[in-house]
Image (cartoon, rainbow, N blue to C red):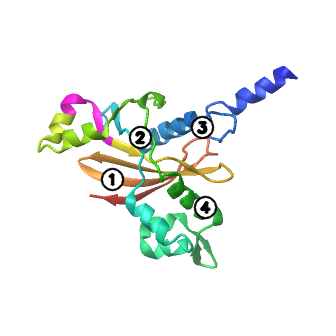
Amino acid sequence: MKSAFLTLLISCCSISFVFCQTENKDSTNYAIYSKVIEEFLKDDLDTISTHLIFRRKTELDEDFSSVIQEFKDSLEKILLYDYHYSVLFESQNKKPFLSERTKQLLIQLDSVNNTSKKIYHEKFQFNNYTSSTISESEFKKVFKKNNGWEHFYQKYPNAFGVLRVSKIAYSSDKKQALFYFSYMKGGLYGYLLWIDLESKDKIIKEMIRLWVS
């Protein structure tokens, strides 16, 4: 009986992306970050960069937070507010609507990111990249200069720009998740990444580009 229980526990806590209550949540989060970001960068034309530099604190895009605050009681209006969110909608009688699960997932994403959290690069589980973090003070120091990128790449010669993630929001059934992902590399890019935690292959369900500059 004891052996059977241990086998079940090990199976439950293995690195799959089906959420397990007994698994350390922080470890699960970093496993998801790692899997998703490598999947996101897989088709990027940059084959030189081998090092990922993360901002040390999590953050959710301010524009997204303002949308959630404004439309908390009627998130269907998001479709009218910004077409980028259209992939979040389902269709019923040819009319778009947000499922209750998706609606709650969006609200949860905003809620869990009310405060920031420190990112620890050694917790990532990348297969093809090394990683490190850059503090907010160092980030500002580097990029306040006119030659900020030159200084940055002198310090991090194989870096893929500067990346940032938000905290992860999970659906109540732990089958889907959302987090915000942005990076600086030539320009500024922000994405909402919608994750299918039950997928055995690619786990990014949708990559919703919120902005580019």
Left/right of residue 10 with respect to residue 24 in the rendered view: right
> Circle 1 sits on which residue?
189
Task: Provide residue 184's location: percent of width, then percent of height.
Answer: 29, 46
- 158 falls in the magenta region: yes
Judged by depth in the image, the label closer to the viewer, 4 or 1, is 4
Dot 3 or dot 2: first in sequence order is 3
> Circle 2 sits on which residue?
42
Q: How many marks?
A: 4
Q: Residues within 10 Å of mark 2 (few under 14, many from 20)?
A: few
* Quarter of the figure that contains the C terminus: bottom left
Which element carries disc 3, helix, strand or loop? helix
Dot 3 or dot 4: first in sequence order is 3
Task: Provide residue 41's location: percent of width, then percent of height.
Answer: 39, 42
Judged by depth in the image, the label closer to the viewer, 1 or 3, is 3
Q: Disc 3 and disc 2: Cα gap in Å?
A: 26 Å
Left/right of residue 175 with respect to residue 81 in the rendered view: right
**Residue at (54% x, 60% y) in the render:** 106
Q: Disc 4 and disc 1: Cα gap in Å?
A: 25 Å
